[in-house]
Amino acid sequence: MAAKPGIPKGTRDFSPVEMAKRNYIFNTIRDVYHLYGFQQIETPSMEMLSTLMGKYGDEGDKLLFKIQNSGDYFSGLTDEELLSRDAAKLASKFCEKGLRYDLTVPFARYVVMHRDEISFPFKRYQIQPVWRADRPQKGRYREFYQCDADVVGSDSLLNEVELMQIVDEVFTRFGIRVCIKINNRKILTGIAEIINEADKIVDITVAIDKLDKIGLENVNKELAEKGISAEAIDKLQPIILLQGSNSEKLETLKQVLASSETGLKGVEECEFILKKFASLRKTEMPDLFDDKTNQIELDLTLARGLNYYTGAIFEVKALDVQIGSITGGGRYDNLTGVFGMPGVSGVGISFGADRIFDVLNQLELYPKEAVNGTELLFVNFGEDEADYSLSVLTKVRAAGIRAEMYPDSAKMKKQMTYANAKNIPFVAIVGENEMKENKVLLKNMLSGEQTLLGSDELIAAIRP
Amino acid sequence: MAAKPGIPKGTRDFSPVEMAKRNYIFNTIRDVYHLYGFQQIETPSMEMLSTLMGKYGDEGDKLLFKIQNSGDYFSGLTDEELLSRDAAKLASKFCEKGLRYDLTVPFARYVVMHRDEISFPFKRYQIQPVWRADRPQKGRYREFYQCDADVVGSDSLLNEVELMQIVDEVFTRFGIRVCIKINNRKILTGIAEIINEADKIVDITVAIDKLDKIGLENVNKELAEKGISAEAIDKLQPIILLQGSNSEKLETLKQVLASSETGLKGVEECEFILKKFASLRKTEMPDLFDDKTNQIELDLTLARGLNYYTGAIFEVKALDVQIGSITGGGRYDNLTGVFGMPGVSGVGISFGADRIFDVLNQLELYPKEAVNGTELLFVNFGEDEADYSLSVLTKVRAAGIRAEMYPDSAKMKKQMTYANAKNIPFVAIVGENEMKENKVLLKNMLSGEQTLLGSDELIAAIRP
């Protein structure tokens, strides 16, 4: 007897119900991407290790899944090399391919390889799995999907506005109330400039982020401990205490950053994006205090991907569920420089499908139609009844109704259990009487109501 | 300067146009699967090698892509083992996971692992990539998609009928004329029985298949060379020369196989499937000579997956393009026995997406709507015009039209080139005059016609 089979840790099977929900998420995002003129591409699951290595830091290199070369992967290896047992070094001899770690590096590689076919600005989206040999834990998987959209080859801030519209639209369609947080790398750079502490910007944002929890005094203490001078901490006070509406925050920042050209540029960009976005929503300057629609918050503690982003930074938090960021993105320069094609700037967002899945589950927001499979099951009472049912079934399907007949003339109870397990809302029962009258007995599985109907009436009853 | 990047041999990038075409294929197949009550599942790309090894023969084991263990994959290996450089043997020490080779073995593993959640008969479909370290060649890739549907846990032949209906429906939707070939493993077993040559059935089907090319005399010669007795060859004559309509073929087979219980059972199954299928089509017995609809041919040379299939065998050939089989399938026993769960029979089909892609390309059958992306581009003449355009754009998108504005106020020629490259059928031009009149100049890119329209008229013009 064979051993009970399992799957690699950190990976998942998706059942029919889970797939229907996931497809609802992907299709909603895809529809909105299409509405905004984004086009889908796909890249291979495997990339050359030379493409992937060195792009995610030392830690990232370790988390790459590497694929063993086919055939004699020992060729060219000396005894000494083998006996060194240097796993990291020899991996590059045993393997030349790896599974993609994200969608960004393969996209950069795609842009470089296909530069002559692409008409810039290139608005592409990509929904594919990525793999990371991370230690699996709750909510962290070794195989998971990313849903990225990027515009490359255009510096216009209208692209940032459009991505905010997309985020707004997607979460409105999901029915998830969110706060879209926005920041700008140039503002952070400006802050570091005015206090002459260019390398301390992460320490500063981490400390500011704790204001609500530990209070101003302790934030200042932490900044001092990080080696920031008393004078600099003094200058930081209006920024630590930055409060009010987005407009008020922007006004404060204009004053504080008056001497930093970069800082002011960041404020200006933020203001442009927020104002355009608001005017297209036909509302005032969007705000954190807006409770009719999704909230927008200028948040200086937002410092994701700081080494990567060069302008706007986005992050989205669900308002009604405690969970980490469910979408993020920003503006970056030089996407493709590492592959020898300089000067390609871009801006992108990435929806976190797994977390959105959890939020929709928790709030029970899946629309019934999206998750429904078969709409109608014909019970099977034997050959004659089956023949009759099959001819009605053909008509029903031709009307676009998802329908099936139980393939065996099993016990009624078994067939009804099947209908319940598959959550089928209607069951058609055909016995001798129904055949004689050229009708079908339609049972509504929710109400229990039973009605005798002709085939056209049957179709109308299911698709009113 | 970095080296020019490439992708692993046998893998592909898919451009926006290719993706749109592929999505059309997958969506068409998916829609029909849903119409027949099939539910989607997904399994991880990686499976344990213990799940995969030994399921595809020695050759298959060699073609598995194996994933190197994370961390110190040398642990537990002696110097002697290492220096043996036995690539095949040591692969199992270095690797415990591999990429899936097909969708069938992971599906069997899924059924066993989730047996308690599944309500049988289980009608599942799965559309996912698989990986094989085959030597790449024209039309053969190392990563490609399979689109499988299977019903497991039901012996009813109505499942076979339904799968034939699905094949018929899918290719009708594609507009590809096909011949659906059908055979039955039990007929082949019956033929072997009556001539007492159980192990020669492959030789026999291969020889019969050559009848048109080499003639009866040479077929008989080949059979003799394969060691089949003169008496057996004599008995085989009606089978080699089997001709006429499917009904005629079935009649001949009934006579020839009169002494073989298994053979007659196979004939009976074939007859049942063909008759039911015909009655649901509201036609006579479907036939090879049917030129109004897809053709159906009982073809004894069909012997695909002979070690695997136990009943019906299907294969689909395109009628108007020279290409191998574009879909195949059949009935199998004991899907899950190898994982310790005996007695699960099933029947399935698999659409060959890559070949269907080629056929649709060659016959130019892609519907325009399916491949279209953005429907309307707003040209960008500067900030005021952009602001005006963006407000119209919001309305247009709210009407469900896929639309975008060129993000930079670049030269007109550049923007029109972009529209052409993306195959956008309509361009909206907004200058000072249009703004004054509160209108938009809509250009039909195909006809060149230009019309001045209000925003509602604009929407109506694009979506009449």
Image (cartoon, coloured by chain):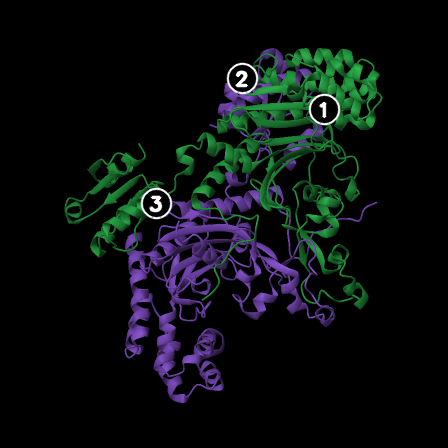
Chain colours: A purple, B green
Alpha carbon separation for disc pair 1 and 2: 53 Å
- Inspect the image, locate mark 3, and give the three-letter code of the amino acid beneath it: Ala
Q: Earlier in the sequence, mark 1 or mark 3?
A: 1
Circle 2 sits on which residue? A454
Alpha carbon separation for disc pair 3 and 2: 52 Å
Chain holding disc 1: B
Let me know if residue A243 appears in the view. no
- Front label number (1 vs 3): 1
Which type of secondary structure does the marked residue at label 3 adopt? helix
Chain holding disc 2: A
Which type of secondary structure does the marked residue at label 1 adopt? helix
Residue at 37 percent across and 88 percent down: it is A231
- Inspect the image, locate mark 1, and give the three-letter code of the amino acid beneath it: Ala
The reply to whether label 3 and label 2 mark residues of one chain is no
- Inspect the image, locate mark 2, and give the three-letter code of the amino acid beneath it: Gly
Q: Callout 1: 10 Å neighbours few (<14), some, many (20+)? A: many
Circle 1 sits on which residue? B207
Residue at 61 percent across and 25 percent down: it is B164
Circle 3 sits on which residue? B421
Q: Position of residue B422 (x, y in %)?
A: 35, 44
- Residue B447 left/right relative to B369: left
Q: Compared with residue B322, is residue B379 higher up or lower down, i.e. above or below? A: below
Which type of secondary structure does the marked residue at label 2 adopt? loop
Q: Position of residue A108 (x, y in %)?
A: 45, 58
- Front label number (3 vs 2): 3
